[in-house]
Amino acid sequence: MAGRALQDGCLQVGEGPATTSLLCGFCQFDEELDHPILSNLPSSLRLRLQDLGSEPWLAATLKLIALEANFNGQGSSAILNRLIETIAIQSTRTLNAQPSEDAQTGFIAALADKSLARAITQIHRAPEQNWQVTSLAEVAGMSRASFARHFIRRVGKSPMEYVRDWRLMRARSLLTDTNLSSNEIAIRCSYNSLPSFSKLFKKRFGMGPGTFRKNGERE
């Protein structure tokens, strides 16, 4: 590549009739978002069509990616983005469905637990609610102590730590994707005090909400 072998999206190296075609892409995540699903992914994942007999949806999506990349028609970039996201989601689901020593722990295992899934879903849907361990336990249909122990064992952090982290991740997303004021975002994420929200945001991400938004705008 340093020798400018990459032209029009094709990397040509060597001579002769034998050829190998590689279709490359990437899925980018906000590295500051320490979500359990992302942190539990392996460092690399290889998907080969000949190994996906039991996963026809993965094989079909890979074939669609190849077809769309070769077609290169209007809207191909948007379609490829969605297909790559689909591959990431399907791969994560497949990995967590495979039997392992840790099959009973982790975020996916928590979502598979109907009681915990109800609580997690409500946290995601309404981060502005004044959630406490007791109220989340009621949503899960469990006692407070049992819910807290069960949540930590499955998710790897306490319920209130998860609530805090989700609110800050949600705030980060709103700062990036909307024009809402910092004060409105704080309220939507259950922080009635803007200074308190700004302090927690800066402690978690190393900069205040205003600075984070300005840096994002420059990018």
Image (cartoon, grey):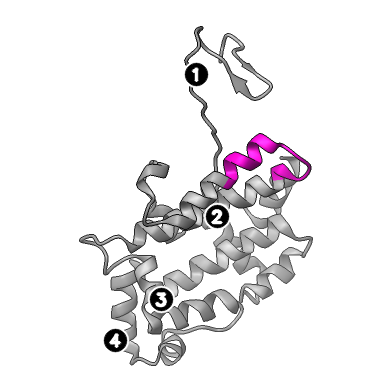
Circle 3 SS class: helix
Any magenta on residue 69?
yes
> From mark 3 to mark 1, how far is it between C-alphas?
53 Å
Any magenta on residue 1?
no
| Residue depicted at 65% across the width and 42% down the height | 68
The spot of residue 203 in percent (x, y) is 52, 56
Magenta part of the chain: 64-77
For this view, does 76 lie left or right of residue 98?
Answer: right
> Which residue is the site of mark 3?
159
Identify residue type, mark 2: Thr
Say which of marks 2 and 1 sits in front. 1
Q: Which mark is residue 86?
A: 2
Circle 4 SS class: helix
Circle 1 SS class: loop
For disc 4, the neighbor class at 10 Å (few under 14, some 14 to 19, many from 20) is few
Say which of marks 4 and 1 sits in front. 1
| Residue depicted at 39% across the width and 92% down the height | 141
